[in-house]
Image (cartoon, rainbow, N blue to C red):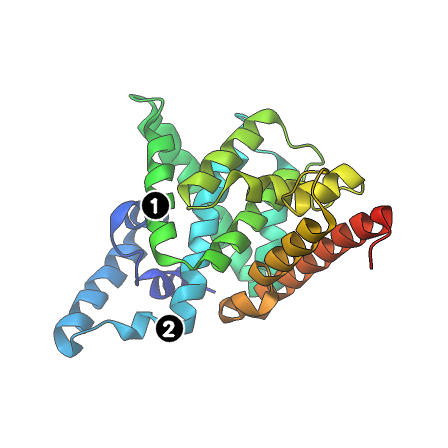
Amino acid sequence: MGFGKWIGGIMGFMAGGPLGALAGFALGSWFDKATDLSGQAAEGTGNNNGYGGYAGQRNSFLFSMLVMASYIIRADGRVMHSEMEFVRQFLRVNFGEAAVAEGEQILLNLFEERKRIEQTDAMAFKRTIRDCGAQIAANLTYEERLQLLGFLVKIAQSDGNVCQAEIDALKEVTLAIGLSLKEVESMLSLRGDSLEDAYKVLEIEPTATNDEVRAAYRRLALKHHPDRVATLGEDIRKAAEEKFQLINNAKERIYKARGMK
């Protein structure tokens, strides 16, 4: 997958705004070229559907993930090999070896841009991330944003330890993309095996009634159902299926502890 395909896919809602500005830096001349082509298409046909549809939504999602990942990875002031390798493996499995170097270069360019803009204002990139989050919230569905957050949580967990700085960054991104703090706390607890973790996954307190437990599970199962992100591709749907199974596992732990059926 060359940069041209990345660009062709993000020329929809990401052509402008803060995400477009970051794409211009991260992808350089490819982005300028695609912007010119998009403008010509709009003049000739009244729209730019050549850059839209399935590929546009999917690649826009992926670029959003890389932008937010650049913030999470650098949250503790370091770039961990395990976190970068998680991103590499994701790209390798789903898009082939060529995508690995390209995705990594995008991340490195984003790291460099953060360093540049923070030289004169330490809060500049944080504000950029918040602005990007608002753009994502306005253009990705609720279910797509949940899946995006799920990938970011996995990146933070990839080194076996999620530090407080990473948790704080995840919470900032969660709110920026229009999700609730309970949702990120639920995802951070997905791989836990304790009863306490299970309650956090279902976003309820241990004092909840049995009826409240059932209702919480139904609500969570509905919003995390894999079919709701099917338009993003089979690989992302499979990741949603894995998360769905972990939610079911949490529910079963609670049901067993309470003797529920």
The answer to whether residue 223 is seen in the rendering is: yes
Q: Is residue 44 above or below residue 122?
A: below
Mark number, residue 241: none
**Which quarter of the image is occupied by the C terminus?**
bottom right
Image height of 142 relative to 232, above or below? above
Q: Residues within 10 Å of mark 2 (few under 14, many from 20)?
A: few
Question: What residue is pinned by disc 1?
Answer: 134
At 66% from the left and 63% from the top, the residue drawn is 241
Task: Give percent across and percent down for residue 238.
Answer: 64, 65
The residue at 80%/54% (across/down) is 252
Q: Residue at x 64, y 40 (%)?
A: 188
Q: Is residue 199 left or right of residue 261?
A: left
How far from the left and from the top, in percent, is residue 223? 56, 59
Residue at 49% x, 52% y is: 103
Q: CA distance from mark 1 to mark 2?
A: 21 Å
Tally of numbered discs:
2
Give x and y (percent) for residue 232.
50, 66
Tell me where residue 230 sits by quadrant: bottom right
Label 1 environment density (alpha carbons within 10 Å; few <14, some 14–19, many ≥20): some
Q: Nearer the viewer, residue 112 or 235?
A: 235
**Which amino acid, mark 2?**
Gly
Determine whether the residue tagged by mark 2 lies in a helix, strand or loop: helix
